[in-house]
Image (tube, rainbow, N blue to C red):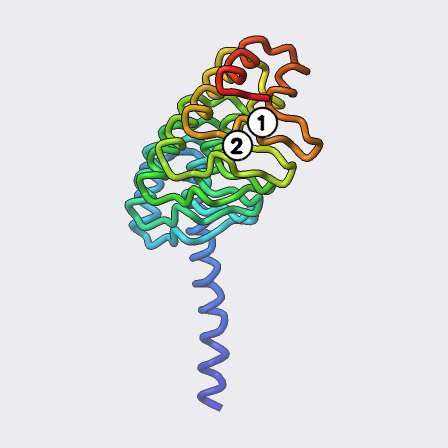
Amino acid sequence: MAVLLCVATLAPAQAATDDNNLRRDLALIAAAGRGELPALEKLLGAGADVRAKDANGRTALNNAAYGNHVEAFRRLLAAGSSVNEPDNVPSSPLMTASVRGYVEIVRLALAAGADVKSLNQYGGNALIPACHYGHVDVVRELLKTKIDVNHVNNLGWTALLETVILGDGGAKHQEIMGLLLQHGANVNLADRDGVTPLGHARRGGYSEMIRLLEKFAAR
């Protein structure tokens, strides 16, 4: 009877402890998303778990990446956060920063060993959305790595194809195209309908892109 009473007494206490830990961990994730360093330090000092995830599958590091909070991101890396843990999208910190153009987060993630082979919900590596959205500096950083410049996503598009198809033909996308071509992008790798980057550039009336592609023997 005494043993049963002891177990019954411990169960609510354990549940209360678990609940407190959960609130603490979620508070860490929220603080990271706001870039609140003092709160971050306090919660880490109280034992908050950097591996914990919220309902969106985001760790504190993921949340810091979404908010472009560089110092919070740096502090969480120092605290042992996994730079390759994806959220529910799925999107790793590197992917999130590449999509949004957060070049300092990209640099920190790469320096911490971010996996350039990780893919997003469209089956693309980080280079593809960075090209799509015209994030020139992010593209430069990614091209310093061993990322696959000719990776094909689930839509059948490479980074070069997305630069033409989803870009606006302007200066940023022209610069990105030049960077891709200089780093070995296959100028004649067509989409699933057999349309090459040059074909898409002609459809869009992008004269500067056409000139650049032809310079690299595009067909």
Q: How many marks?
A: 2
Q: Nearer the viewer, residue 35 or 51?
A: 51
Asked if residue 141 shows in the view, the reply is: yes
For the C terminus, the image quarter is top right
The relative height of residue 211 versus residue 110 in the rendered view (above or below) is above
Q: Residues within 10 Å of mark 1 (few under 14, many from 20)?
A: many
SS class of the residue under badge 2? helix
Pointers 1 and 2 in contact (CB under 8 A)? Answer: yes
Return the residue at label 2. Answer: 128
Name the disc covering residue 162, or none.
1
The residues bearing labels 1 and 2 have C-alpha atoms spaced at a distance of 7 Å
Extreme residue toward the right, this view: 193
Q: Is residue 165 left or right of residue 183?
A: right
Residue type at numbered disc 1 = Glu
Q: Nearer the viewer, residue 45 or 96?
A: 96
Residue 194 in percent (x, y) is at 68, 30
Q: Residue at x 52, y 38 (%)?
A: 151
Q: Residue at x 53, y 24 (%)?
A: 133
Residue type at numbered disc 2 = Ile
Q: Residue at x 57, y 27 (%)?
A: 188
> Residue 111 sits in which quadrant?
top left
